[in-house]
Amino acid sequence: MMIALEDIARYIDPVALLIVIGGTFLVTIFRSPFKDIGAAFRAIAMVGKADPAADAAAARLCVSRIRELAEVRSLSCADRVETAQRFLLRAARTLSDARNAADFARWAEIEIEARRQRHQATIAVWRGIAEAAPAMGMIGTIIGLVQMFARMDDPGQLGPAMAIAMLTTLYGVLLSSGIAAPIAGRLESLSEAELSWQTSACRQLELLAREELDRAPPPAPVARPRLRTVP
């Protein structure tokens, strides 16, 4: 057991970690706004627990309930449908207040585009980390090699310098290919699935709005003059 711990400890170097993680974090700060960085780290929680298939099924059920409610009453009661998805709640409220289908379609387009941009900003943060980490690892490797060549006259100092040179490369690859890139890929697939069912749900709700709100009222009956008979 002690031997295994010693073997693991050989792969841990605080200086190498500082160069790679600290340098990558600084590059990320310079490349992305703080709100996007915060959103990127909060999105980690969605990587494991998100279930796009269940969300899509819940959206179909919600739209079906709105359709049934519209048939019994009207779309003005759409906001009474209960759902755990906040996007559908906002869509139902907007639909109940919409004057026509164009109003709802305009809201849906703006809302979905805003969500797409937020998703892309979050994914870009992790893509940036995946790109910066190997570069920081290469910088650490160069630093370690410079220190090693500068201490060639002292063989006892070559080990720590060589450790920095090798471990920074290892940390950079692990942070990039083992953490940041998989998270970015997972978030991208989740974004595509989420935007897909949200777009589909909004299209169905827009059709309901066209059927009810854009339906032309029947023409009023034209009063015909009554003919008077001449005695």
Image: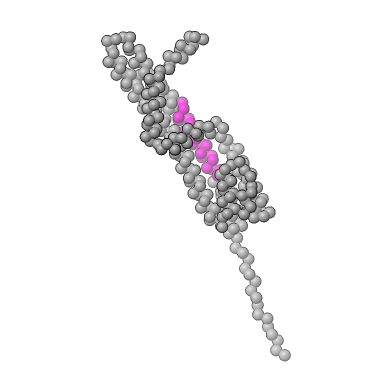
In this view, the residue in front, 171 or 196, is 171
Q: Is residue 204 visible?
A: no
Q: Where residue 60 sits: x, y (%)?
A: 62, 44
Q: Where residue 178 sits: x, y (%)?
A: 46, 26
How many numbered discs? 0
The image quadrant that residue 16 belongs to is top left
Asked if residue 3 is positioned above or below residue 193 in the image, the reply reads above
| Magenta stretch in the rendered image | 178-198
Question: Is 83 a magenta residue?
Answer: no
Identify which residue is drawn at 59% across, 39% down: 55
The image quadrant that residue 84 belongs to is top right
In this view, the residue in front, 96 or 203, is 96
Identify which residue is drawn at 56% across, 34% down: 50
Question: Is 182 a magenta residue?
Answer: yes
Identify which residue is drawn at 32% across, 12% down: 157
Q: Is residue 179 visible?
A: yes
